[in-house]
Image: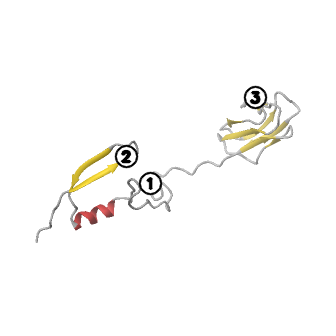
Amino acid sequence: MQPRITATIVICTIAAGVAVVGLARPATTTETAAVAADAPATTVAGYGAAPDDSTPDGAGSDDAAAAPAEQVEVVIEGFAFDVPGTIAPGSTITVTNRDGAPHTLTATDGAFDTGTIDGGAATALTLPTEPGTYSIFCEIHPSMTATVTVGA
């Protein structure tokens, strides 16, 4: 017995409002099984099964990306630096100034400097790749001092 083949009109609406119209034939049972085994679930214009988001992206693949680096923040508040413990070499940290006055976070040896951070603002700073303990100060308020420990 031969399978019965009929023409089906397929219409898909794209977000920009363009319609695509074409003819398709129903797949045979064998073709359906092969496609179902290889294709991820997808949704077109709200129809169909939603993808399974329970598996993290890249899980099980050989080229999975490394986990994102920990978010590190140094806070300037009350004319003082609040620096977390040891920070990984080369990390990009966020320096947040919670004071009303402008400040800087500057290494005494010149290894890094945020420039002026206005009150209530934040900036990013990349730390050196060389491990060590770096003395820091505020160029605007030199009595503000602390250390940043960069470790392996």
Q: Do the residues labelled 2 and 3 touch (CB within 8 Å)?
A: no
Of the two numbered discs 1 and 2 in the rendering, the one whose residue sits closer to the viewer: 2
Q: What residue type is labelled 1?
A: Asp
Which residue is labeled 3 in the image? 116
Q: Which of marks 1 and 2 is nearer the N terminus?
A: 2
Closer mark to the observer between disc 1 and disc 3: 3
Q: Nearer the viewer, residue 7 or 54?
A: 7
Packing grade of label 2 (10 A; few <14, some 14-19, many >=20) is: few
Looking at the image, residue 11 sits to the left or right of residue 43; the answer is left
* Image mark for residue 14: 2
Q: Is residue 80 left or right of residue 27?
A: right
Look at the picture and state if 7 lies above or below 128: below
Q: In what element is the residue under mark 2?
A: loop
Pair 2/3: label in front:
2
* Mark 2 or 3, nearer chain start: 2
In this view of the protein, which residue sits in the foreground, 82 or 37?
A: 37
Marks 1/2: CA–CA distance:
33 Å
Q: Which residue lies furthest to the right in this view?
A: 143
Numbered label attached to residue 62: 1
Amino acid bearing label 3 = Thr
Relative horizontal placement of residue 70, taking residue 29 as reference (left or right): right
Please report contact status of discs 1 and 3: CB closer than 8 Å, yes or no: no
Question: Residue 30: x percent and y percent?
Answer: 22, 66
**Residue for point 76% across, 47% down:** 84
Give the percent coordinates (x, y) of residue 105. Answer: 77, 33
Question: Which quadrant of the view contains residue 37?
Answer: bottom left
Hey, which quadrant is residue 92 in on the image? top right
Question: Amino acid type of disc 2?
Answer: Ile
On screen, residue 143 above or below 47? above
At 73% across and 38% down in the image, what residue appears?
95
| Location of residue 14 in the rendering, given as x and y in whole percent from the top left corner | 37, 46
For label 3, the SS is loop
